[in-house]
Image (tube, grey):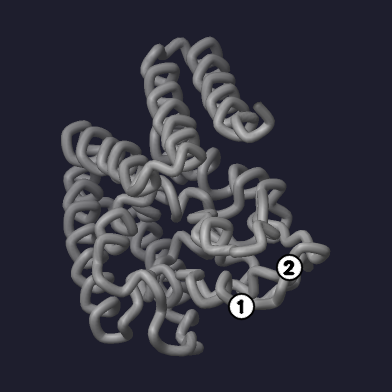
Amino acid sequence: MKQYAIPVLMWLLFEAIGVALWLTLGNSFYLFNFSYIGTSLALGIFLYIKKVKYARNVVQFAVGFYMLVYLGILSRENMQIEGFWYYLFSGVFGGAVIHYAAAKILGPFLFGRGWCGYACWTAAVLDLLPFPIPRQPRKKRSFIRYALFAGSLLFVAALFFSPAPSMDMIMFRSFMIGNALYYAAGIALAFALKDNRAFCKYVCPVVVFLKPASYYALLRVKNDETKCISCGRCRKVCPMDVDVPDNSRRRFNGTECILCLKCIAECPAKALHL
């Protein structure tokens, strides 16, 4: 039964957050929101344990497109990084701020970059492209993500210094345009570099939030060195170029792990585990 501890604990964590926000803010939506996300994640991990094919992809679409379509498009709330800055500076402790705090700022202390592997609506589409295993060495282009991170902050700051008559409409349009550009850039980079996750490695500005806490993540892939046969298969299948067998927190690209668990499934010696 130990193998089911992670999905159960994941579900309990999200339920606890949902109940706490519901009682604190008096809005039952938060209970529904976190219950839905927590149940989806727990179910996905359970299906993965049962070796159900595409279990992670199902979770990506269940969570990611709930946030993209329902929260973003239908509820007209900007769930991108610009929305986080906008609502934070507006003093609105709402959807985007809570989402970033739970999934991308504090959450990574527990589950690292699990958001990228199980909930990101951009990656949900990119993971369906034909290059799941990188075919080229990783390039030093991550400065792009920091430029976009700064750009998103400057964009929102400019809106506050020069307030437009319809700020909410501007934020909604920026959400729609931003997502379209993200998908276009992600697909183009995947085919150009033969790497589905090229966008995540070089462009995505959200990673600037995710990386610091991910270094200390409680939930991470570990290697039982007494079983490891040094075959290197885990490194070859890793979509994020992580030096998986190295147990050190300083391992190469260690904060890039998205917990896709392909390395665990591929290990012939069963040396890898969470």
Residue in the foreground of this view, choosing between 164 and 145: 145
- Report x, y in % for residue 29: 37, 18
Give the residue displayed 43% in from the left and 26% down from the top. 39
Q: Which of 187 and 162 is in front in this view?
A: 187
Judging by the rendered image, the residue that carries numbered circle 2 is: 228
Please state which of residues 31 and 163 is positioned toward the viewer in this rendering.
31
Q: What residue type is labelled 2?
A: Cys
> Which label number is shown at residue 232?
1
In the image, taking residue 58 as reference, residue 89 lies left or right, namely right
- Distance from label 1 to label 2 (Cα)? 10 Å
Classify mark 1: helix, strand or loop.
loop
Three-letter residue code for mark 1: Gly
Q: Which residue is drawn at 48% across and 44% down?
A: 100
When asked about the image quadrant of residue 211, the answer is: bottom right
Q: In this view, does 122 lie above or below 119?
A: below
Q: Alpha-carbon neighbours of circle 2 within 10 Å: few (<14), some, or many (≥20)?
A: some
Please say if 72 is above or below 189: above
Residue at image coords 33%, 48%: 54
